[in-house]
Image (cartoon, coloured by chain):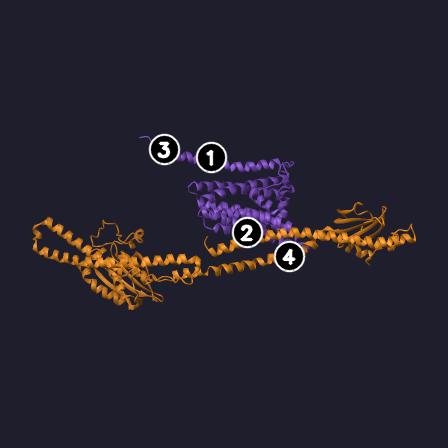
Amino acid sequence: MLLSSVIIVLREVLEAALLFSVLIALSKQMGLNSRWIIWSLLLGVLGAFTYGMNINNVSEWFDGVGQEVSNALMQLTIYFMLVVFMLMLYHFSCKQKVSKFPLSLIMIMIILLAITREGAEIILYFFSVTHSQNYYMAVLVGMTIGASIGISIGILFYYLLSNLKPERSIFIGLVLLLLVSAGMISQASLLLIQADWLPSQLPLWDTSELLSEKSVTGQLLYALLGYEATPTAIQAGLYLLGLIFPISIIMGLKFTYTRKKILSDRPTKQ
Amino acid sequence: MKSIRFFLSIVILSTITLMAFLSALNGYRDSMTKAEQLFDSELMDKAHLLSIVFSALHIKNKSLNTDVSLIDLESESGKIDNGLTDETRGEDFNDHFFAFQIWQNDQLLLRSLHAPETAISQFKQGFQDINFFNHRWRAYSYYNQRSNLWIITTERKDIRYVLAENIVLETILPVVIMLPFLGILIWSIITYGLSPLRTLAKELGSKRADDLTPLAIDKQPVELIQVVNSTNDLLKRLKASFFREKRFASDAAHELRTPISAIKVHLHNLSHLIPLPELPSAKNSFLQLQSSVDRMGHLVEQILNLNRTSAEQYVTRFTELDIYNIAQDVIVKEYAHFEEKQLKIALEGEHCHINGEQFALEILLQNLLTNACKYTPEGGSVLVNISSDDNNVYLNVEDSGPGVPEDQYERLFDRFYRLNGDCHTSGTIGCGLGLAIVQQIVELHHAKISLGQSSFLNGLLVRVIFPKEGAK
């Protein structure tokens, strides 16, 4: 029970902690104040409790697959918010002006949704498992260990990112967010497959022997890259699409900026 | 990185947590495997023990009567009972951890109460995982060739798991519990380790502006010696530089005073020697020359004042003074200028005492009154008001001049800044140092200065707020 508690809690905490630490480090680099952090945490915890406590009602939606569908919708919303955030970040890295209020609002929304979903999963797991006295201590210790490992990795990531040079930190942050956001798409597609909204298929490959999802490394890669040992073709395709979509917009932006610069640098005819 | 202490504490704690928990997880996995092996060997021992006991019994029975099996299952003695009734058996059933069967030639000779009547596992030597009675069991089958008996011993896997986990948990729990204490310990150690840095910062922070004595180096840790050496070197150079600046400014001002006074005397003499009214162009140049010399004289005086009242140079000699009396004296001294412009000057308020320096406060008031006099049109009024409450003493100087736009208030305190620059409309002598000197004196007295619009006279209002306790 201890090991499964560690893995379940680590899976949820690590994802939120990584997202959180990357966003805080980047917001510091962009000169935002830290008020949004407190707001997003407070609202997130509140959201997690509300969602966790009403999960029975939510599950009944959409012919009994409400939980899967709403989780998938949350993941998709986080993905699109992350894409907007990445574009703003790229905009900022090109020495363009970025308005701080919408940026803070997007970050609050991302963290709020992430904590709501992950927090609700942890709350549900805790209440469903601890009614058996046999496992109480093991579950509690496992959850503490899982949460501590997740938070520790998040903290170390934060300090690693915030102590880099701004340009490098923004670049690494952008790459991390890109991978995490594509992972969100892959998770959302898995949830929709579970809800039968997407067709289920045979897995494309099976790397569980090589790197099990149930190991700490597997969980770290799951949170970072959306690692799946047995992905289906739809999942892998959507993952790739999730990667290509923001990259192509960023490339488009880059092209526009370069063209603008060339035009403005060109001497005007007398 | 806002605080080194916070950064070190949190990063060290995170790293230790990560490492400790990862190794605890590894240890947990290994311990669980070992516990599993231990249970397996115990299960094997039980089978061997049963085999030894029942083989001996079986061989003995066989020697007496060859066709009689070990124990007749149909008889009550064929079951090993623990004294439970049929009603209580059901409740107790789920808690049973161990079961066994003894077989011979497909015939069940003996079984424990909670074992099924069919063969638990295949008749194949070794360990197997099997299901029966809604649980997962670990079974060990052993064949005794001498007695031709199959002994099958089983244990419930879930109970084994809980038992093993409870034992392993006992070793992991201290690691989890010690974490908050470890956090406190790390915080305390880092706080203690950083104390020389804090002491150094405190020592530097509490240094008076004019205290340029070097810092003590003997008690500093190796890491800080370079910092202290560099700071001391800087202080030494700063001291020499201040000394040079002080000497230069005061010497230059002193040296300039004499020739300026001489120029003034010669100008005065010249004005009597040349028939100026008959030479209008010469008169104009002469007046401009006189004005420039006055301006230069004023500038030299102001530079001297600025130098004398600067915090770096000033040796504080604060005494309790009546600011009302000082204002009275300064007004008397400056009265001639006011009379010249036909300005009305009034002093209102009460006698208030503050801790201050007589000479500096005189310069402060002189500068404020000179400014008011300069910028108030002829026939205007200037009001000096001194009041107090429980904590502060207020000095207000108001005039009926044109006032100053609000966005210029801050800049007025800059050195050599004059409103509207060189195109000053007042045509009065000034060098833009007056309010800079006033601000310097205000800071010296830990007072505050603010500018505003006079509600009585519609000109500029300068308000200085002295704390009653004053700068000691």
Camera-side residue of B213 and A77: B213
Q: Which residue is mark 4?
A: B171
Q: Which residue is mark 2?
A: A152
Residue occupying the point 52% across, 58% down? B186
Q: Chain of mark 1?
A: A
Task: Check if mark 3 and mark 4 are on a common chain.
Answer: no
Q: Chain of mark 4?
A: B
Which of the marked residues, 2 or 3, is nearer the chain's N terminus? 2
Tint of chain A = purple
Q: Which residue is mark 3?
A: A266
Task: Check if mark 2 and mark 3 are on a common chain.
Answer: yes
Mark 2 vs 1: CB contact within 8 A: no
Residue B143's disc is none
Q: Which mark's residue is nearer the viewer, 3 or 4?
A: 4
The picture places residue B166, in percent across and down from the top left corner, at 68, 56
Q: Which residue is mark 1?
A: A252
Q: Give the CA distance from mark 2 to mark 1.
A: 37 Å
Q: Give the CA distance from mark 1 to mark 4.
A: 57 Å
Q: Give the CA distance from mark 3 to mark 4.
A: 72 Å
Dot 4 surroundings within 10 Å: few (below 14), some, or many (20 or more)?
A: some
- Helix, strand or loop at disc 1? helix
The number of callouts visible is 4
Which of the marked residues, 1 or 3, is nearer the chain's N terminus? 1
- Helix, strand or loop at disc 4? helix
The picture places residue B91, in percent across and down from the top left corner, at 77, 55
Tint of chain B = orange
Q: Is residue B9 left or right of residue A230?
A: left
Mark 1 vs 3: CB contact within 8 A: no
Is residue A87 visible in the rendered image? The answer is yes
Camera-side residue of B348 and B193: B193
